[in-house]
Image (tube, rainbow, N blue to C red):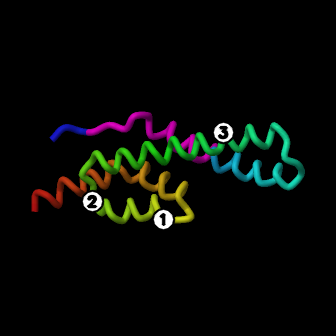
Amino acid sequence: MEEVKLWADKNILIAMVIGGVILLIGRVTLMNSTKDFLTLLVSGVVVTLLFMSWLAVFIDLMRVNIHNKSVWFIGLLFSPLQPLFVILYLLNRDKNLRLSKRFKSI
């Protein structure tokens, strides 16, 4: 079985999630003041960063055989802490792939 790679580097995806969360916090503080062009621009960047990183992890989950796949799907789809699940998945991806291969051999 060949190794399936992510479409982007793991560190870039983690940086996208962290940047998106930081901009989301900034967007909430800007939204309290006014609804100007800057708030709309920050909102668009936040949605783009968080959605692209989430989509990369979601597609990767569908492509690879990973240990506890259902737990990761539930966390990505239904959790209010989706950015946290994206980061945890990216940090633990290699370990979960090794676990999946190990459990198949048993």
> Dot 2 surroundings within 10 Å: few (below 14), some, or many (20 or more)?
some
Which quadrant of the figure has residue 71?
bottom left
Residue 16 vs residue 56, the one in the foreground: 56
Q: Measured from the top left, where is residue 98 in percent x and y?
A: 24, 52
| Range shown magenta | 4-19
Q: Measured from the top left, where is residue 50 in percent x and y?
A: 57, 46
Q: Secondary structure at mark 3?
A: helix
Residue, far right: 33
Mark 3 or 1, nearer chain start: 3
Q: Is residue 95 left or right of residue 50?
A: left
Instruction: For marks 2 and 1, give the CA distance.
Output: 19 Å
Mark 2 or 1, nearer chain start: 2
Q: Secondary structure at mark 1?
A: helix
Residue, far top: 8
Q: Nearer the viewer, mark 3 or mark 2?
A: 3
Residue type at mark 2: give it: His
Residue type at mark 3: give it: Val
Q: Which residue is mark 3?
A: 45
Q: Which residue is mark 2?
A: 67
Looking at the image, which residue is at 85% across and 55% down?
Answer: 32
Instruction: For marks 3 and 1, give the CA distance.
Output: 22 Å
Q: Measured from the top left, where is residue 76 in percent x and y?
A: 45, 58
Residue, far left: 106
Residue type at mark 1: give it: Phe
Q: Nearer the viewer, mark 2 or mark 1?
A: 1
Residue 78, numbered circle: 1
Q: Quadrant of the N terminus?
A: top left
